Image (cartoon, grey):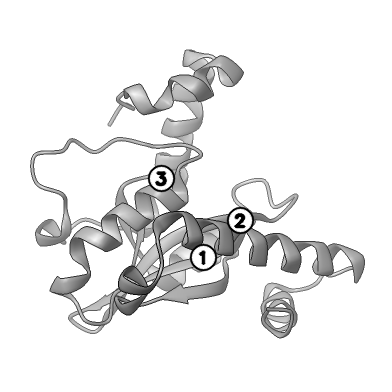
Amino acid sequence: MEYCMTDYDYSILEHYGYEQYQKVANDLIAYMSECEIKDLNEYYFPHIPQRVYLKSCIARSYQYFECHYEFNEDMRLVGGLYSGKSNIDYVWHAWVEFIDNDREIVFDGVLQRFYDKHKYYGKFQCIPINEYHEDALEEFEYEEIAEEIETKCNKVKHEMALNGYYDKPIEEIREYALTKV
């Protein structure tokens, strides 16, 4: 599926340019295709085409969580770190997790797709740091959640760099990161 441009993307285009932006989007979709779960139609937004929202992980994951948490009591918004395709550096990221028919699922707000949680964590080397359940929507505004995710993730990333954790196995990195939250 080719990437579909949205108005939301134009500020990023100034930095990347349309062709590079489209290439990044399509490369990410292809990279994650083996992890994708395609039989979750009841969890898709109705009447909205699948699009890619680069640099919008918190906003798009929060939006999805806000619209769907009442359909699945296990649903939670997760903020954490991931190393992406490059495995060079960890960056903060947000996604949604839930269980459906005994399967652990991740909804990636950037890619607007569903993935097997264990494969997703393996591909992106995810380190979950924050979890928000439905009560967080009543307690916090979006901006507070976004700021908390960024702040905690940046703190953990800084600690990891100071203590030389970038070259260690992912299990050791995850264990260390969780002690720094």
**Mark sitting on residue 79:** 1
Q: Which residue is mark 2?
A: 92
Q: Is residue 166 visible?
A: no
- Measuring from the top left, give residue 84's x and y in whole percent: 60, 51
The residue under the point 66% across, 61% down is 151
The residue under the point 32% across, 69% down is 137
The residue under the point 47% across, 40% down is 28
Is 69 or 119 nearer to us in this picture?
69
Amino acid type at circle 1 is Gly
The disc, 3 or 1, on the residue closer to the chain's N-terminal end is 1
The disc, 3 or 2, on the residue closer to the chain's N-terminal end is 2
26 above or below 19? Answer: below
Q: In the figure, is residue 13 to the left or right of 40? A: right
> Quick one: SS at disc 1?
strand
Amino acid type at circle 2 is Trp
Tag 2–tag 1 contact (CB < 8 Å): yes
Amino acid type at circle 3 is Val
Q: Is residue 116 visible?
A: yes
Q: Which residue is mark 3?
A: 110
> Quick one: SS at disc 3?
loop
- Alpha-carbon neighbours of circle 3 within 10 Å: few (<14), some, or many (≥20)? many
Is 172 or 97 nearer to us in this picture?
97
- Alpha-carbon neighbours of circle 1 within 10 Å: few (<14), some, or many (≥20)? many
81 above or below 70? Answer: above
Q: In the figure, is residue 25 to the left or right of 122? A: left
Q: Give the CA distance from mark 2 to mark 1.
A: 7 Å
> Quick one: SS at disc 2?
strand
